[in-house]
Amino acid sequence: MPRSVSGVRTDAGAVLEARDSREGRGPSRVQHGATVPSERIRTVVVDDHEGIARLVANRIATLIRERTAAGERAVLGLATGSTPIGVYRELIRMHREEDLSFANVITFNLDEYYPMAPDSVHSYHRFMWENLFDHVDVDRKNVHIPRGDLPRERVDDACRRYEDEIRRVGGIDFQILGIGKTGHIGFNEPGSGSDSRTRMVTLDAVTRRDAAADFFGEDYVPREAITMGVATILEAREIAILATGEHKAFIVRRAVEGEVDVEVAATFLQAHPNTTFYVDRAAAAELTRIKTPWLIDEVQWTPDLTVRAVVWLSETSGKAILHLTQRDYAEHKMSSLVARYGTPGAVNGEVFNNLGAKIRGKSKLPRGLRTICFSPHPDDDVISMGGILRKFVENGNDVTVAYMTSGNIAVFDHDVRRYVDYTVRLAHNGHGDAKAADALATKVYDFFDRKRPGDVDIPEVLDIKRIIREAEAISGIETVGLPAEKGRFLNLPFYQTGKVKKDPIGPEDVAIVRALLEELKPELVFVAGDLSDPHGTHRMCKEAVDLALQEYAQAGNPRPEVWLYRGAWQEWPVTEATWLVPMSQEELRLKIQAIFKHQSQKDSAPFPGSDDREFWQRVESRNKDTAGILDRLGLANYFAMEAYVVE
């Protein structure tokens, strides 16, 4: 018999809601139905992914304890991927520190690639044991994950038995979901029906491309998978679907606010009576109550919201800001804003001046400051802020670029072959130890001959890949005018797994960053706020910098000003940016030349994300687009522009 499950607590975001109402932003606590008519799935907006992890883990812990107290077992439906890892880490912490027991927990995972050996580095079996099961007291016989290693003729029968087992234990109490860019839940790709059950599916091209980073190339991503069906998911008594990052914003809005569509499986969740969508602010950015809250309810017109609204009105109407009229405001439910200021001209003038004040050419940028640019990978500096780096050099600032990771997993094996061949030829021409070069080449080539996709490289190969990227990085900063000694390579330990999956940020990582802060005592630091990279390294590097800055300040040091940059995956909107830094045609060309120095990442980078363009092409487009937005709003017409947020 189905068991009742208490609903998700809706007071978790009350503090956020109170704060947001003061700031004129959309409320953060659970809202749907009559409160937010545009939202068809109850949605919680949380400041960051750590907040999501705590909320969901606490709900799971409450459920487990309730079931245990009643002498029953909790049945969990689990997901894989980067989004739920935070939930699993919090559950592990609760197990270790708060005596949360999994002894009476039964689990069913959503999916598995096919074919896939359970011990493969890409296997969801391995993922779950490494990220949760090995760290808690779950009974192995209570863990269920679809088998990806069965002969094809046995798959259908195994899928039926999977469904039978879910029914036998009374159904799933709490199901965790992520959401793909196509709106898939599990591997229920576009076209999956609402009555679908556990089965083998063919993966969509977008899904395979998104998984390419984990498999060191799209060619190695399996074309099939086994997944729970939509109907199986919808039978869970409670569902939590999680999404983080700017790259999920559009599909979140489609799932929450759009019509039910067989091409977007997540929209089927609109019919579920107890589903909650947990999103961070970046993933919530396109929701109507966040992006255009004045369209659905009365708002408090704060300065930030006023700027956002007027820019939106200008772009929607196709008029420059100073040309907006009373009629434009009235037709877009913004009459209250005009009433606040008295006339459209007063509103237009204030927003126009606000945006103009953000523009910082070289003469308005800092001079003579000790500065650190923290670059997650050995190319993020020139990709994201090559323009301002050059201006800082010209302004006499003391700039050090700190490369936080080696980036060595993002070097193709054929580049290693080329450099090893070069080393051998150089040595045999009297410029090195020919015997040692031959031995290195033999070891490297023998490894490559037996290497399988996803295998961790031997130390020699990892070192060569690291050195390739270090040499490219130095060439890049020299292009913008920095000497080689201004490049520092931190090689943070969290990255040194040799795999796409990294370790959590630990005390060693923070200590290395803090040591650099104490050595250089910067007055300004640049940090990557570009959190949509496909493997999460940018987010983890920012975490290390944030923790190090906290310790640095607690030790009595003056906290440096922090400027967040973006560029590799997206750009700051002009409404969010603190500073907009223009570039001339020549300055953009110099920036692109610096990007070209990273030859191992040119033409076809190992981890390009969903954008097929080369990094320099993305940069050129984004920097010109940012300048183009200002032009369309009626401000100055610059050639290109970088954007920064002062934290």
Image (spheres, rainbow, N blue to C red):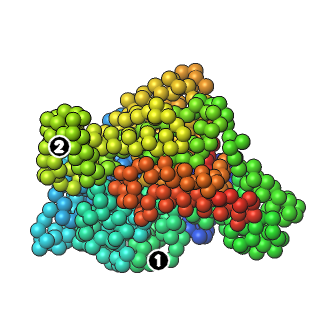
**Which sits in the foreground, 485 or 15?**
485
Residue nearer the viewer, 54 or 584: 584
Position of the N terminus by quadrant: bottom left
List x then y, in percent, for residue 168.
22, 64
Closer to the camera: disc 1 or disc 2? Answer: 2
Q: Nearer the viewer, residue 524 or 155?
A: 524
Q: Give the mark, 1 or 2, whose residue is nearer the N terminus.
A: 1
Q: Quadrant of the C terminus?
A: top right
* Element marked by disc 2: helix
Q: Residue at x 21, y 43 (%)?
A: 425
User: Mark 1: which amino acid?
Assistant: Val
The residue positioned 75% from the left and 49% from the top of the image is: 357
485 vs 126, left or right, is right
Q: Amino acid at mark 2?
A: Ala
Disc number at residue 260? 1
> Mark 2 highlights which residue?
441
